[in-house]
Amino acid sequence: MGVPLYQAKAELFKTLGHPARIRILELLSERDHAVHELLEQIEIEPSNLSQQLAVLRRTSMVVSRRRNGEVVYSISVPEVRDLLLAARTILSGLIAVQGELGDELTDAASPARTR
Amino acid sequence: MGVPLYQAKAELFKTLGHPARIRILELLSERDHAVHELLEQIEIEPSNLSQQLAVLRRTSMVVSRRRNGEVVYSISVPEVRDLLLAARTILSGLIAVQGELGDELTDAASPARTR
DNA sequence: ACACCATGTGAAGAATTCTTCAGGTTGTGT
DNA sequence: ACACAACCTGAAGAATTCTTCACATGGTGT
């Protein structure tokens, strides 16, 4: 077989591990956007945006087509939206857990200790 | 407010962007594991495993407690499982899309061109 | 053919993240 | 108290990833 599944997953997550790329995907999950439209929403240099779009294109997470004088991007796999939603859920879960950690007054289990 | 949401998401995904950490979470989503048990399943040096566990602990994605002579880890937010599942779905979606790309015989839209 | 706008690209230095090494710490049994 | 087992940690060099610069390219309208 090819690449082990867990490694493919890691690479997928790595692709998502950048603020600009998250914003791009969030915007694209609302509706298709031309590059200059993304540029207005995201604070980033044009060439940097191109680089990030290239990363997303290489993994086939987005596709581009030309419309009039502009290049329009869209999400290729709609389930990406679910992933972004799940992330938000987990994020609030994590905040909740981090709160609970402060409640441990007595338990002295050492490796769990925060420094 | 604190950190923008999209950046928190990016950091969450970054945490997941490592094969060893994916494996750890997959194993922990089946059942709790002691460190030495993880060590048998994952091909990695002990100290490296500790480092990766530390990364997961810092983000509160896992918690550890001591049981008998060993340290047992578990997932703190169960929804992490959903995230891993969603990733698998998307992965197969991506493979499908990548297949379709090969089917474009005539369409010469340039930026979509693969190199 | 030319000029212009919208994008894309290679390269290079800066910044992050990985991996491993050497040595610590904690808890348990004796 | 001592020794051992199971883990953890800081530090440092290697490897990746980011960001920006300087410059291409590709359409479009004239």
Image (cartoon, coloured by chain):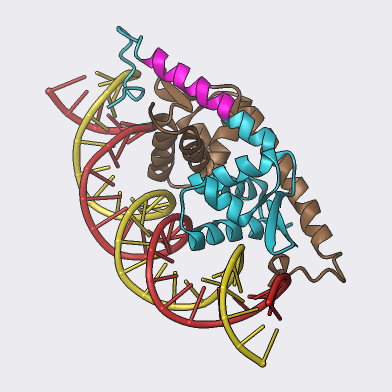
Chain colours: A brown, B cyan, C red, D yellow
B111 relative to A12, above or below: above
Horizontal side of A81 relative to B79 (left or right) equals: left
Horizontal side of A99 relative to A110 (left or right) equals: right
Residue B112, quarter of the rendered image: top left
Q: Residue at x 68, y 61 (%)?
A: B70
Horizontal side of A50 relative to A37 (left or right) equals: left
Q: In this rendered view, identify the residue nearer to me: A55 or B16.
A: B16
Which secondary structure dominates the residues rendered in magenta? helix
Give, as a single range, the part of the protein colored magenta: B88-101
C15 relative to A10, above or below: below
In percent of width and height, residue B11 lies at: 59, 50
Q: Is residue B98 magenta?
A: yes
Q: In this rendered view, identify the residue nearer to me: C1 or B32.
A: B32
Q: Is residue A76 visible?
A: no
Residue B115, quarter of the rendered image: top left
Horizontal side of B85 relative to A71 (left or right) equals: right
In percent of width and height, residue A6 lies at: 50, 37
Q: Residue at x 72, y 69 (%)?
A: A113
In percent of width and height, residue B84 lies at: 62, 35
In percent of width and height, residue A77 lies at: 54, 22
Q: Is residue A103 magenta?
A: no
Image quarter in which the N terminus of chain B is found: bottom right
Q: Residue at x 42, y 25 (%)?
A: A71
A23 relative to D3, above or below: above
Q: In this rendered view, identify the residue nearer to me: A109 or A55.
A: A109
Q: Is residue B95 visible?
A: yes
Residue C22, quarter of the rendered image: bottom left
